[in-house]
Amino acid sequence: MKKLYPLLSVLFLIGCNVGEEVIEYYDIGNIRSKGVILQNGEKNGQWVYFFENGDTLKTERYYKGKLNGFFYQYHQNGNKSWMGEYKNGVKVGNWFVNNEEGEWIIWENYDKDGKLDGYLFFRNEKGEIELKQSYSNGVLLNSEVYTYNEEGKLEKLTTFDEDKKVISDIEF
């Protein structure tokens, strides 16, 4: 009997986190979302959301109600439109926003506290970097705006400080 007590304790603790699968539907009958809700009402585990046609819209993971793990959102053509990672409910590491062809157009980096840190890049439809911003601990340090001619040749680079004042303006 003494050996049974630790096993029962473990089973009780596991049982406290047991949830119920929840499935929501569109009016036409297709699944809108599905995942697990704990007894306390918090989301847990993987949640999947769907377009009305049944294709995957996004996937995200929760741990006791907080986003935790990789997040993916998709265009209707199946290519990823947005991706990154959450830890304890905040964005961490590299995050990307992609166009419908699957090429990144925004790239940003977050520190462990969910603050922008390092560089943030924006690219135009030709793949050219139009904006580069530098952050530290969530604070904007400076911005660089790149201007191109119709042939894609860099014409101008303008640098701004954290107060959006021009600190340099170089023409090529």
Image (cartoon, helix red, strand yellow):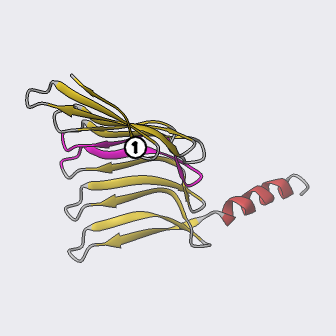
Range of the magenta residues? 77-101
Of all residues, the one furthest to the top in this rendering is 172
> Which kind of residue does numbered mark 1 sit on?
Lys
* Quarter of the image with the N terminus in it: bottom right
The residue under the point 83% across, 54% down is 6
In this orientation, which residue lies closer to the viewer: 49 or 1? 49
Spot occupied by residue 118 in the image (x, y as percentages of width and height) = 49, 34
- Vertical placement of residue 150 versus 45, above or below: above
The residue under the point 15% across, 24% down is 153
Of all residues, the one furthest to the right in this rendering is 2
In this orientation, which residue lies closer to the viewer: 136 or 16? 136
- Vertical placement of residue 62 versus 148, above or below: below
Residue bearing the label numbered 1: 165
Residue 94 visible in image: no
* Secondary structure beneath label 1: loop
Count of labels in the image: 1
Spot occupied by residue 21 in the image (x, y as percentages of width and height) = 47, 66
Residue 82 visible in image: yes
Magenta segment main secondary structure: strand
Name which quarter of the figure residue 102 lies in.
top left
Of all residues, the one furthest to the left in this rendering is 150
In this orientation, which residue lies closer to the viewer: 95 or 131? 131
Name which quarter of the figure residue 9 lies in.
bottom right
Magenta span includes 90: yes
In this orientation, which residue lies closer to the viewer: 116 or 152? 152
- Vertical placement of residue 55 versus 133, above or below: below
The residue under the point 85% across, 58% down is 5
In the picture provided, is 4 more to the left or to the right than 127?
right
